[in-house]
Image: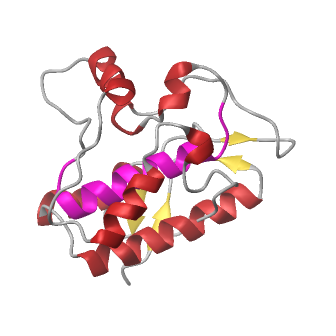
């Protein structure tokens, strides 16, 4: 891998608090292109989070750390492994009913939400992993007034609890 000297997306979020909609849109577009490339090659990433996204010297993103990735032999194949970071883990992983590439779009939705608001709704101090995972299943994600109408629509599509209705599920496209 090339040397990427711009730091993690996590660092930039911590430094700036949140991003403008234009900056978040640019980063989201680059993440979507990366996910589409992975998915078209049969790879489910499974651990998309700001700590695993690097920013290069020209401001472009690179996904790193493929340790939890799953290579599917067939498009219809599903995974059952319980893995990922609790604050970014998709509900279907928690339920254990099998999942595909749509889990990466749940994580993307949370990253976009975080880039625009400065918070991840599941990153709360004082909670253990079980409590965070329970929040993913039970909590509704609130849309902030600072989100545009289009942003709310995108986030609601990416953060649907039902993976068959989520953007990126293959049925709805992205």
How many marks can you see? 0
Which residue appears farthest toward the bottom when viewing the image?
Answer: 58
- Please determine whether, in this image, residue 44 is positioned above or below residue 54: above
Horizontal side of residue 65 vs 11, given as left or right? right
- Residue at 23 percent of width and 58 percent of height: 11
**Where residue 71 sits in the image (x, y, percent)?**
75, 42
| Residue stretch in magenta | 99-119
Q: Is residue 160 magenta?
A: no
- Residue at 23 percent of width and 64 percent of height: 116
- Residue at 70 percent of width and 49 percent of height: 43
Horizontal side of residue 127 vs 169, given as left or right? left
Dominant SS in magenta: helix
Is residue 66 in view from this perspective?
A: no
Give whichever of 157, 93 is nearer the camera.
Answer: 157
Is residue 75 in view from this perspective?
A: yes
**Where residue 122 sits in the image (x, y, percent)?**
26, 35
- Please determine whether, in this image, residue 133 is positioned above or below residue 106: above
Q: Quadrant of residue 89?
A: top left
Q: Quadrant of residue 1?
A: bottom right
């Amino acid at each position: 891998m090339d040397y990427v000297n711009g730091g993690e997306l996590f660092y930039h979020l911590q430094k700036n608090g949140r991003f403008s909609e234009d900056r978040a849109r640019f980063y989201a577009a680059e993440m979507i292109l990366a996910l589409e490339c992975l998915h078209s090659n049969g790879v489910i990433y499974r651990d998309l989070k700001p700590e695993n996204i690097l920013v290069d010297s020209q401001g472009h993103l690179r996904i790193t750390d493929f340790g939890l990735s799953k290579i599917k032999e067939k498009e219809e194949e599903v995974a059952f492994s319980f893995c990922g970071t609790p604050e970014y883990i998709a509900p279907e992983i928690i339920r254990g009913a099998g999942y595909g590439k749509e889990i990466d779009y749940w994580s993307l939705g949370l990253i976009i939400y975080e880039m625009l608001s400065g918070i991840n709704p599941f990153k709360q101090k004082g909670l253990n992993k079980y409590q965070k995972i329970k929040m993913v299943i039970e909590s509704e994600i609130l849309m902030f007034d600072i989100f545009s109408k289009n942003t709310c629509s995108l986030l609601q599509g990416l953060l649907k609890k039902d993976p068959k209705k989520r953007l990126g599920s293959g049925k709805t496209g992205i």
